[in-house]
Amino acid sequence: MTPFINRQYNYFWQPFFIILCILVIIVAALCIYTYSQNCSLAGNKDQWKAVFISNNQTYFGKIVSETAKTLVLRDVYYLQPAPQSSDQVKKAPTPQPQYNLLRLQDAIYKPISEMRINREQILFIESLQADSGVIKTIQRLSAIKK
């Protein structure tokens, strides 16, 4: 008689257990999907980002797409140290480095203004505020080029 009761007990709880497993899988999938959407850097394609690379170079642009291995940056600008005259070096006790902001497509080899960056080379990424000096300079340079 005892084995019969155990079978009834198992058949009674089996559908609940299956439904519970399905619900856990659905909730886990939703959590993973939500987390991956929140981690997406390309969500707002109009926001300017600063991408810091392991070779001490910083690129500014808009992230348009991303994969697990690469990040695509469009409207790319970068910083280049400005040449300093010997007078500037002599006058300042500790001269502050000056930088020029340049468009990638204005480089001597004329690339398109899109860059694929290996994620392994990215140190960190920052979003720029609308009143950032970099964005203001980019807007000024864009107005001059038009």
Image (tube, rainbow, N blue to C red):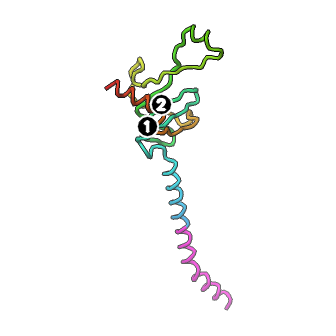
Mark closer to the observer (1, 2): 2
Q: Please provide percent x and percent y for residue 82.
A: 51, 17
- Give the residue furthest to the right: 2
Q: Amino acid at mark 1?
A: Lys
Residue plotted at (52% across, 21% down): 99
Instruction: Return the x and y of residue 83 as percentages of the image width and height.
Output: 52, 13
Residue found at the very far bottom of the displayed protein: 1
The residue stretch that appears in magenta = 1-23
Q: Position of residue 143 (x, y in %)?
A: 34, 27
Whether residue 11 is in magenta: the answer is: yes
Separation (CA) of disc 1 from disc 2: 13 Å
Q: Is residue 58 above or below residue 11?
A: above
Q: Amino acid at mark 2?
A: Val
Residue designated by label 1 = 62
| Relative vertical location of residue 114 with respect to residue 67 in this rendering, above or below | above
Quadrant location, the N terminus = bottom right
Task: Check disc 2 and report the residue beneath it.
Answer: 134
Vertical side of 32 occupied by 40: above or below: above
Q: From the image, which quarter does the C terminus lie in?
A: top left
> Is residue 112 toward the left or the right of residue 98 in the image?
left
**Most foreground residue, 122 or 24:** 122
Could you tell me which secondary element the residue under label 2 belongs to?
helix
Q: Nearer the viewer, residue 59 or 128?
A: 128
Label 1 environment density (alpha carbons within 10 Å; few <14, some 14–19, many ≥20): many
Q: Secondary structure at mark 1?
A: strand
State the image coordinates of residue 3 (x, y, percent, origin top left).
Answer: 66, 86
- The picture quadrant where one finds residue 74 is top left
Q: Nearer the viewer, residue 1 or 29?
A: 29
Q: Report the predominant secondary structure element of the magenta stretch.
A: helix
Nearest the camera: 83 or 25? Answer: 83
